[in-house]
Image (spheres, rainbow, N blue to C red):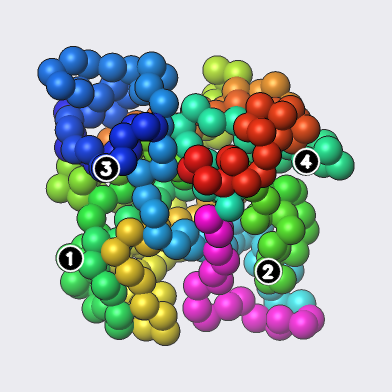
Amino acid sequence: MAKAVFKIAGISYMMESEVDPERNTVIIDGKEYSANQLQWEAPVSGAIYGVLLNYKGEWEQFREQMTKPPYHHPPNAPILYMKPSNTVNVHGGCIPLPDDVPELQVGAALGVVIGQTATKVAKERAFDYISGYTIVNDVTIPHETIYRPAVKERARDGFTPVGPWVVEKKDVDDPDLLDIRVFVNDRLVQHNNTKHLMRSVASLLADITEFMTLYPGDVLLVGVPERAPLVKAGDYVRIEIEKIGRLENTVVHEKDWIKETGSHETRAHSV
């Protein structure tokens, strides 16, 4: 069991309780519930930052491209992008597939949740600034470029499922040694481990806060493993991260998603 914080739909405050990451269950008022029995809200409220090229396999995949014009050499600092608030989705929520897009990429990412204002953090003190860890599906429309900000491909409504909870830092011994598995329709399609990060969690936090401040509640995605699985409408996606739990979502056509939620504004407000 682990301690976690989370938010249930219809309840205005964050709750804290024990969860079982292996079984994906939570204890509420002495009763155990499966995560799929409850309606969730996102367990985070701050800015969400993604990082490109932070898995060794992904780095190798794009190594040659990084040496060609206009770049000429690999980047010296982390390549960041944002997942704005309109993208935030929840455990059990539907992921909209845009009408003009045949498939989406699943981005299985460990989310590092910031616990206190972090500026110019020393690597050896990085964990002092972390409150816990969550699971994020960094959904994106497949695209070629690795340097141009892919806003149209990454910042669509509903493209960032998060949750179902944030496991407290003390219950994750080593965030740089966590198995990550992705299942599509219950079939294992990706398996990796955070031991393959180019920059460790501490190094990443130190490098990023050298030039920008992170605030309590912000989430830093440590990266997405190479060969991200592709999904289409009707697919059921499950991301499992060791010691944290499972994040599950279904892909639906965008028109059906809008019909179900009433409007883009309704969905954005609800998460």
Element on which disc 4 rests? loop
How many other residues sit within 10 Å of disc 4, few (<14), some (14-19) or many (≥20)? some
- Magenta segment: 69-85
Task: Verify whether residue 220 appears in magenta.
Answer: no
**Residue with the mark numbered 1:** 128
Q: Do labels 2 and 3 touch, CB within 8 Å? A: no
Disc 1 versus disc 2: distance between alpha carbons? 31 Å
**Residue with the mark numbered 3:** 13
Question: In screen coordinates, is 59 left or right of 98?
Answer: left
> Split into 4 quadrants, where in the image is the N terminus?
top left
Q: Determine which of the numbered discs, if any, sits on residue 98 in the image.
A: 4
Disc 1 versus disc 4: distance between alpha carbons? 40 Å
The residue mark sitting in front, 1 or 4, is 4
**Residue with the mark numbered 2:** 149
The residue mark sitting in front, 2 or 4, is 4
Q: Is residue 129 visible?
A: yes
Question: Which one is earlier in the sequence, the residue at label 2 or at label 4?
Answer: 4
Question: In screen coordinates, is 104 left or right of 167?
Answer: right
Residue nearest the observer in this picture, 48 or 246? 48
Q: Amino acid at mark 4?
A: Pro
Location of residue 26 in the rendering, given as x and y in whole percent from the top left corner: 25, 24
Disc 1 versus disc 3: distance between alpha carbons? 25 Å
The residue mark sitting in front, 2 or 3, is 3
Location of residue 57 in the rendering, given as x and y in whole percent from the top left corner: 56, 53
Element on which disc 3 rests? loop
Disc 2 versus disc 3: distance between alpha carbons? 35 Å
How many other residues sit within 10 Å of disc 1, few (<14), some (14-19) or many (≥20)? few
For the stretch drawn in magenta, the main secondary structure is loop
